């Protein structure tokens, strides 16, 4: 049975968002976070505030290139990601700037079968 999520209509245009629980690998305490699904992003991103809140350890740095061609070095953190109705994942996510939107990229979306129904504003994950 697929997990079903509604688009967030408070952003324009409406977009699929996914509620998930994020935690350190070595702790049971988790934080609920909404992630924007971005199938154009290579890597998932968490805001620096979430990194600090969970005290996630930087495991490495990687160079990323944005749409404007600018290259930037970002820290990578390892975390546990639990999406309702799906098996928990261990994820190496980039850390974005303060107040950045949490993003689930293709490193996560390619692990699932996604059905994005734009007219109905529904995302199914299985």
Image (tube, rainbow, N blue to C red):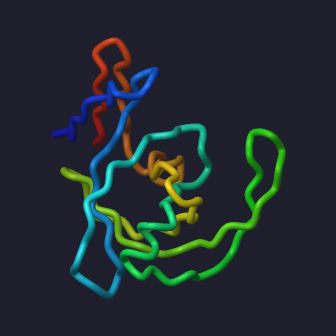
Q: Is residue 60 left or right of residue 6?
A: right
Q: Is residue 75 left or right of residue 62?
A: left
Seen from the viewer's position, the closer of residues 110 and 6 is 6
Residue 101 coordinates in the image, percent (x, y):
48, 49
Residue 104: x and y in percent read 46, 49
Instruction: Give how far across and how far down residue 60 sits, in percent.
Output: 65, 79
Q: Quadrant of residue 29?
A: bottom left
Image vertical order of residue 7 relative to residue 30, above or below:
above
Name, please, the residue furthest toward the bottom.
Answer: 26
- The vertical placement of 122 against 34, above or below, is above
Residue at image coords 25%, 60%:
32
Position above or below: 11 against 68: above
How many dots with numbers? 0
Closer to the camera in the image, 124 or 76: 76
Judge by depth and name the residue closer to the eye, 39 or 14.
14
Q: Quadrant of the N terminus?
A: top left
């Amino acid at each position: 049975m697929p997990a079903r999520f509604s688009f967030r209509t408070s952003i324009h245009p409406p977009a699929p968002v996914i509620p998930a629980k994020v935690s350190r690998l070595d702790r049971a305490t988790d934080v609920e976070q909404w992630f924007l699904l971005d199938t154009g992003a290579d890597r998932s991103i968490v805001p620096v505030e979430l990194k600090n809140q969970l005290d996630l350890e930087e495991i490495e740095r990687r160079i990323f290139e944005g749409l404007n061609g600018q290259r930037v070095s970002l820290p990578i953190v390892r975390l546990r990601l639990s999406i309702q109705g799906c098996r928990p994942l261990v994820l190496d996510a980039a850390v974005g700037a303060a107040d950045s939107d949490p993003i689930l990229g293709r490193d996560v979306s390619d692990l699932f079968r996604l059905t994005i129904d734009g007219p109905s504003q529904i995302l199914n994950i299985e």
